[in-house]
Image (tube, coloured by chain):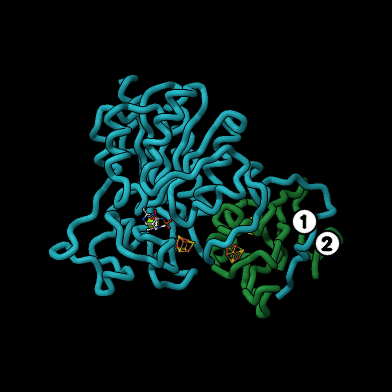
Chain colours: A cyan, B green
Amino acid sequence: MSIVMTTRPPEAPSNKVASFKPTLLQTEEHHLCPGCGEPVAIRLVLEVIEELGLAQKNVSIIGHGCYGSFIMTMDVDSTLCLHGRAPAVATGLKRMRPEVAVWTLQGDGDMTSEGLAEILHATARGENITCILLNNGVFGDTGGQMTASSVIGQRTKNTLEGRDAAYHGYPIVIGDMVAAMPGSAFVARGSVHNAASIAATRRLIRKGFQRQMEKKGLSLVEILTMCPTGWFVPASGGADYMMESLGKTYPLGEIKDIAATEQA
Amino acid sequence: MRQVTRGTLVIDADRCKGCELCIVACPPRVLTMSRTGNATGYLYPELAPGCTGCTACQQVCPDFVFEVYKYHEPIVSGSDAERMQ
Ligand SMILES: Cc1ncc(C[n+]2csc(CCOP(=O)(O)OP(=O)(O)O)c2C)c(N)n1
Ligand code: SF4
Ligand code: SF4
Ligand code: SF4
Ligand SMILES: [Mg+2]
């Protein structure tokens, strides 16, 4: 089969329609695993921040997980905080600098296992922050152990036979909990398993930041991200595996949008 | 076979980690995995004529391997403008 030369840009007249990396990322290099969904989600957040003109006025508060290494390469002001405490740190920052877009980046282990109290209290207070949750249903960074978000039947490093509700309990569906509280403005769940979902997720992230700028309250944008390493599946099988497992417990779409309620 | 190509890529093959997510993401299926490894030993995608410039591969790739271009005028296979290896 014939192969097109792709080592340099074309000579025939053309427009560049997509760049390697978002402008707010300083390098394409990262050490996350093959097939990991987290870099894809982080690309979306950085692109939205730039689109909304927030590049020079946003601060990210980063939890602990594989995504945390992007603190080294994202061209945004960032601080790393204790495991699970990102919404609390974001609260302090936002109250001192209300004009700045403050966003948190947490994994499911960070948000629903180690720091459940923080996201709930920040929502109860109606803090004007945008919380991004990368949900892969495992503690990816430490080797794929069960989190509060692991779904029933899910194989993890410490639930090799699958999560058993009778023994391990049921998953915490944090999006539904946050949506039920009056302090939340926007709650939605996206996914990066294919290009259509990635485009839809970009729109959800955008709304999550817009509601903060409109001072409506807390936004939570959960993004299902592949963790083939922690799931013990091949990198090429991560996307399908995710929708067969996490996708069944965590349906995609908007859960709550205060703007829609106000219009009605 | 007459093949129309509306877009093309720059593929930074040495950054690829071989996950194959781009292969299934490409609507016209013009990406296939190489047979030999890149600098790190991973197989990487190669482009056949027929790219539409839709950017799906660039969006799904976790390793920022793709840059996408759209031609002002579509290129018909066999023409001089076609970039064959
Ligand atoms: C207080 C505390 N406990 C445990 C750890 C170890 N630790 C670091 S990352 C991590 C897993 C994080 O999981 P998650 O937030 O889901 O992120 P993922 O790696 O899956 O993206 C753990 C348990 C820590 N750094 N601090
Ligand atoms: S362990 Fe999972 S979440 Fe962490 S980099 Fe690897 S695939 Fe991504
Ligand atoms: S831009 Fe679209 S058509 Fe071209 S290789 Fe990528 S996915 Fe395929
Ligand atoms: S999606 Fe990216 S990293 Fe994965 S095989 Fe394709 S080019 Fe390589
Ligand atoms: Mg996780």
Q: Amino acid at mark 1?
A: Ile
Give the residue pinned by disc 2. B79
Q: CA distance from mark 1 to mark 2?
A: 7 Å
Binning the other alpha carbons within 10 Å of mark 1 as few (below 14), some (14 to 19) or many (20 upward) gives: many
Quarter of the image for the C terminus of chain B: give it.
bottom right
Q: Residue at x 50, y 29 (%)?
A: A101
Q: Residue furthest left?
A: A166
Q: Is residue A228 left or right of residue B82?
A: left
Q: Residue at x 36, y 50 (%)?
A: A110
Give the residue pinned by disc 1. B75
* Residue A89 percent across, percent down from the top left: 41, 36
* Residue B5 percent across, percent down from the top left: 71, 57
Q: Quadrant of residue A6?
A: bottom right
Q: Residue at x 57, y 60 (%)?
A: B26
In this rendering, the answer to whether A112 lies above or below A89 is below
**Circle 2: element type:** loop
